[in-house]
Image (cartoon, coloured by chain):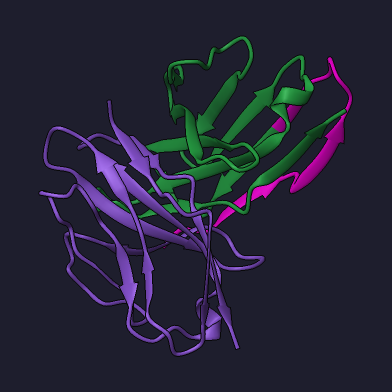
Amino acid sequence: SAVISQKPSRDICQRGTSLTIQCQVDSQVTMMFWYRQQPGQSLTLIATANQGSEATYESGFVIDKFPISRPNLTFSTLTVSNMSPEDSSIYLCSVELARNGELFFGEGSRLTVL
Amino acid sequence: AQRVTQPEKLLSVFKGAPVELKCNYSYSGSPELFWYVQYSRQRLQLLLRHISRESIKGFTADLNKGETSFHLKKPFAQEEDSAMYYCALNSGTYKYIFGTGTRLKVLA
């Protein structure tokens, strides 16, 4: 299994500012995933962070809005830039240790934008 | 388009009653399907996957390709089963598509 730590667990931010969410995994993984869960919605994949290369973004998500860093095999950050109230959501970091469908999730970062 | 539908946002049952959480999917190929669960104040975790054909905590789920369904069932609900349940589909890549989730409340 994998233990994933996310920081911050929650934050309240002002419109127009940016927030960086950190994700630390207790084992080395090739791919780390960032999901968004808006109120009452399902989990939506934002991007996949690969160590040593640029992140791969899903349709509807762009690097300028959600820049991602992946400096090593155990750590990644997601920045939510120029925030608006529509960005209020839970952001989840996830990894898959083996290609067996078991995703391990962090506790999530609950972001509220005023 | 690939899609997972969980029609019920909330399902309330009494302790000891049978439970069925519905999941329907849309996918043209051979999907891999999963159920994830999130208990109160805990992180999201895998409950079971259709490939394993296993029973976890008394829950089972059968993939019905004709009806494109993967309903989660348990014959006798327990209070500790109260949680948020998500059905998820994997199309053979690293991408997982999640349903909107069903909150199960088991009443004493």
Provide residue B15's location: percent of width, then percent of height.
Answer: 51, 87
Find out whether residue A26 is within the magenta segment: no
Residue that appears at 62% across and 52% down = A5
Left or right: where does residue A87 sit relative to residue B29?
A: right
- Left/right placement of residue A72 relative to residue B99 reads right
Image position, residue B77 (x, y; %): 44, 83
The x, y position of residue A83, in whole percent, is: 77, 19
Q: Nearer the viewer, residue B26 or B55?
A: B26
Along the line of sight, the residue nearer the viewer: B58 or B8 = B8
In the displayed structure, A50 sits above or below A23; it is above
Q: Residue at x 72, y 43 (%)?
A: A110
**Does A92 sit above or below residue B54?**
above
Q: Quadrant of residue B63?
A: bottom left
- Residue at x 15%, y 55% (from the top left corner): B64
How many marks the image carries: the answer is 0
Q: In the rendered image, which quarter is residue A40 located in?
A: top right
Q: Residue furthest top?
A: A64
Q: Position of residue A33 (x, y in %)?
A: 46, 36
Vertical side of B46 occupied by A59: above or below: above
Chain B's colour?
Answer: purple
Q: Would residue B98 be found to the left or right of residue A23 on screen?
A: left
Magenta region: A1-20
Q: Which chain is green?
A: A
Whether residue A11 appears in magenta in the rendering, the answer is yes
Q: Quadrant of the C terminus of chain A?
A: top right
Residue sitting nearer the eye, A76 or B95: B95
Q: Identify the residue shown where x is 12% and y is 41%.
A: B30
